[in-house]
Amino acid sequence: MSVNKEIKRVTTHILQAMKGKGEKIAMLTAYDYSMAKIVDDAGVDVILVGDSASNVMAGHETTLPITLDQMIYHASSVVRAANRALVVVDLPFGSYQGNSKEALSSAIRIMKESGAHAVKLEGGIEIAESITRILTAGIPVMGHLGLTPQSIYKFGTYTVRAKQEAEAQKLREDAQKLQELGCFAVVLEKIPAALAQEVSQSLQIPTIGIGAGQHCDGQVLVIHDMLGINKGFRPRFLRQYATLYEVMNDAIQGYVGDVKAKAFPNEKEQY
Ligand code: KIV
């Protein structure tokens, strides 16, 4: 039984129907309560508690160091804020690659301890057994193909993936496999737009693109990137909707200046 009947939660079935109607899916990352509240109130359909938290929240160079406990902490903060959006949580590096039993227990911990609605895993055919086991427990799974940052040391760089035919063909097969297994959607990261279009048209389940062109069924961006909080990060695929680094820096400099000048607090700002 649902305790909040006023706001209709986005479900995996709704996302499927959106694809059917040609209605694009808007997904953004969030990692904390306050940001997730703004994202949810603004009408985002899916909030991804991405392991990009490792970069933007913790300052690591890659997504590899973040732990399952840390992902659960971020996810539970986001879940408390999200009334409408479907909340999807990344299984972090090392929490599912070992074997399918470990994958299932990691996914169960995320669902039980954070209250999230689905998990996301990076990879294709090679993690099929883990995906099946998680799905069998009734946990919705989002796939992730193309540039999969947890494999950065295998790739060597963050450049566009699947430009060569052999890798493109593997991606087509992986996408079909993810659908066949029962994933409800698949993220396509940094692949040629024409390939993303072909895959999106060939799948019944929605594709969510990041650096994968306009023909995906939805789009996802890292919130800190699209708000311009990460000052130096300007890849071609990123549209910056605000320049919050400057806005926040100006505000903080104003505060520092006022404190130093003994202009804050004034008489009205005290008891
Ligand atoms: O962790 C993340 O933010 C992601 C998106 C880039 C898709 O996986």
Image (tube, grey):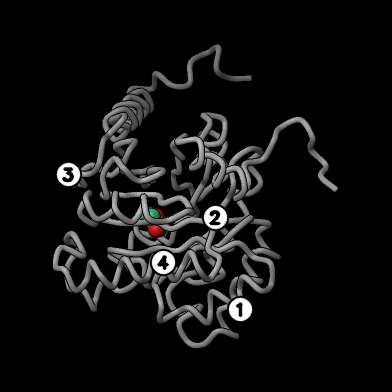
Instruction: Classify 10 Å Cα crowding around label 3: few (below 14), some (14-19), many (20 and above).
Output: few
Residue 236 is tagged as: 3
Choose mark 2 or mark 1, whichever is in front. 1
Q: Residue furthest left?
A: 164
Q: Which residue is mark 1?
A: 133
Which residue is painted at 53% across and 48% down in the image?
32
Q: Secondary structure at mark 1?
A: helix
How far apart marks 3 and 2 lie (CA) works out to 26 Å
Instruction: Classify 10 Å Cα crowding around label 4: few (below 14), some (14-19), many (20 and above).
Output: some
Q: Which residue is mark 4?
A: 176
Q: Which residue is mark 2?
A: 88
Question: Where 118 falls versus 245 (above or below)?
Answer: below
Q: Quadrant of residue 137?
A: bottom right
Instruction: Classify 10 Å Cα crowding around label 1: few (below 14), some (14-19), many (20 and above).
Output: some
Question: Where 248 falls versus 35 (above or below)?
Answer: above
Which residue is painted at 22% across and 49% down in the image?
193
Choose mark 1 or mark 3, whichever is in front. 1
Q: Quadrant of residue 249?
A: top left
How far apart marks 3 and 4 lie (CA) works out to 28 Å
Question: Is residue 82 rendered to the left or right of residue 99?
Answer: right
Query: Can you tell me whether the CB of the residue at mark 1 lies under 8 Å from the nearest atom of ligand 1?
Result: no
Question: Where 63 falls versus 213 (above or below)?
Answer: below
Spot occupied by residue 240 in the image (x, y as percentages of width and height) = 27, 34
Please name whichever residue, 4 or 69, is drawn nearer the observer in this view of the structure: 4
